[in-house]
Image (cartoon, grey):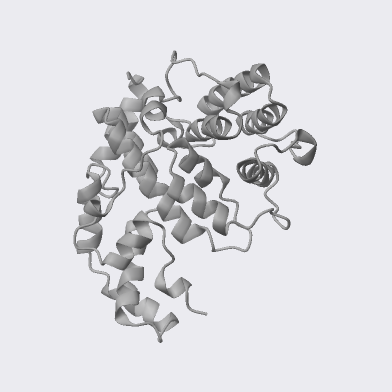
């Protein structure tokens, strides 16, 4: 896939920044995280949780180093643009959704993590999708998230009950709603109504609106994972629609990523040499962390 010059320039700048570590491979970054001095982080955590054994304290500090906000996503996109390695992009994105699940999902009573769920759908990451369905606060009732909260509820509702009717979904939008987010809700409505024409048009609007939005970092919007996730949602809940995305122009759609990521998970234990087995399980299988099981 060919990338526009401005994307290549931004990706090159990101990789060249030593403070961001975007030049590292997946294994190199994990190794760097494990080799960093976390003694201060351990002591800070000990003050909050004096009853925890040292293994938990160190595991918490290490996992927090590995769970790197949106850097996993940006790192994968930058390396996809420069090296054209779609397997590595999927690997980085799988780590991104697992990181967000552990560190952001339970920070609030009703955290709106629809974007992480769509990211997981984009690469058909069944482990993360199932954990979202298992642990999410659904439906959101107290959230002030507006359209994002309504999209969260709608995506969850369709995944849990594919035969859901349009009348059972709240897909209202306001005048200030971004065009691509409005298109996401229109796509959900089209899927619920089993309208191929409307779904196809809405998906095209998501891609064109996402490409133009100024509120999102260029490296984060280079590939519209939300659109990939919506299409995968349609394939799961309304396969008879058989939607397609035009490959020209390619961005922000990555046809190769969509094609190869069906039904496979590539994050595995081999990617985490030297990491404690229980911590690997929490990343690879999204098993509960030890401190999450304490009453």
Q: For this view, does 53 lie left or right of residue 198?
A: left
Relative horizontal placement of residue 170, taking residue 119 as reference (left or right)? right
| Name of the residue lying farthest toward the right | 167
Residue 66: percent from left, percent from top: 32, 57
Identify the image quadrant of residue 159: top right
Is 9 drawn above or below residue 59 in the view shown? Answer: above
On screen, residue 58 above or below 284 = below
Let me know if residue 62 appears in the view. no
> Residue 212: image x %, image y %?
53, 25
Image coordinates for residue 236, horizontal then vertical, percent:
55, 34
Q: Quadrant of residue 93?
A: top left
Image point (70%, 52%), residue name: 144
Q: In this view, does 43 lie to the left or right of 216?
A: left
Q: Which residue is drawn at 33% across and 79% down?
A: 43
Which residue lies at the image location 24% right of the left edge and 29% below the top edge? 83
**Residue found at the very far bottom of the displayed protein:** 51
Q: Where is residue 104 in the image (x, y as percent from the top left)?
A: 50, 58
* Residue located 35% across and 55% down the image: 284
Residue 109 visible? The answer is yes
Quarter of the image where one finds residue 177: top right
Quadrant occupied by the N terminus: top left
Q: Nearer the viewer, residue 229 or 241?
A: 241
* Picture layout, residue 103 above or below residue 251: below
The tally of labels here is 0
């Amino acid at each position: 896939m060919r990338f526009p010059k401005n994307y290549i320039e931004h990706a090159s700048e990101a990789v060249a920044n030593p403070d961001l570590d975007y030049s590292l491979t997946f294994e190199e970054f994990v190794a760097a995280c494990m080799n960093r001095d976390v003694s201060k982080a351990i002591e800070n955590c000990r003050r909050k949780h004096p009853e925890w054994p040292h293994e938990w304290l160190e595991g918490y500090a290490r996992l927090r180093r590995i769970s790197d906000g949106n850097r996993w996503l940006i790192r994968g996109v930058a390396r996809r643009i420069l090296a054209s390695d779609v397997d590595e992009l999927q690997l980085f994105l799988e780590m991104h959704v697992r990181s967000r699940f552990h560190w952001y999902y339970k920070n609030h009573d009703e955290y709106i993590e629809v974007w992480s769920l769509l990211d997981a759908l984009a690469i058909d990451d069944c482990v993360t999708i199932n954990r979202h369905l298992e642990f999410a606060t659904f439906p959101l009732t107290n959230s002030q998230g507006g359209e994002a909260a309504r999209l969260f509820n709608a995506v969850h509702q369709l995944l849990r009950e594919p035969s859901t009717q349009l009348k059972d979904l709240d897909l209202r939008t306001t005048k200030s709603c971004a065009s691509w987010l409005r298109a996401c809700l229109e796509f959900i409505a089209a899927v619920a109504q089993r309208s191929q024409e409307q779904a196809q048009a809405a998906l095209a609007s998501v891609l064109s609106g996402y490409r133009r939005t100024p509120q999102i970092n260029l490296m984060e919007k280079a590939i519209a994972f939300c659109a990939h996730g919506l299409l995968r949602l349609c394939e799961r809940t309304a396969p008879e629609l058989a939607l397609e995305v035009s490959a020209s122009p390619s961005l922000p759609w990555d046809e190769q990523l969509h094609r190869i990521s069906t039904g496979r998970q590539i994050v595995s234990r081999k990617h985490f040499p030297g990491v404690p087995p229980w911590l690997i399980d929490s990343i690879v299988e999204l098993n509960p962390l030890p401190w999450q099981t304490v009453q």
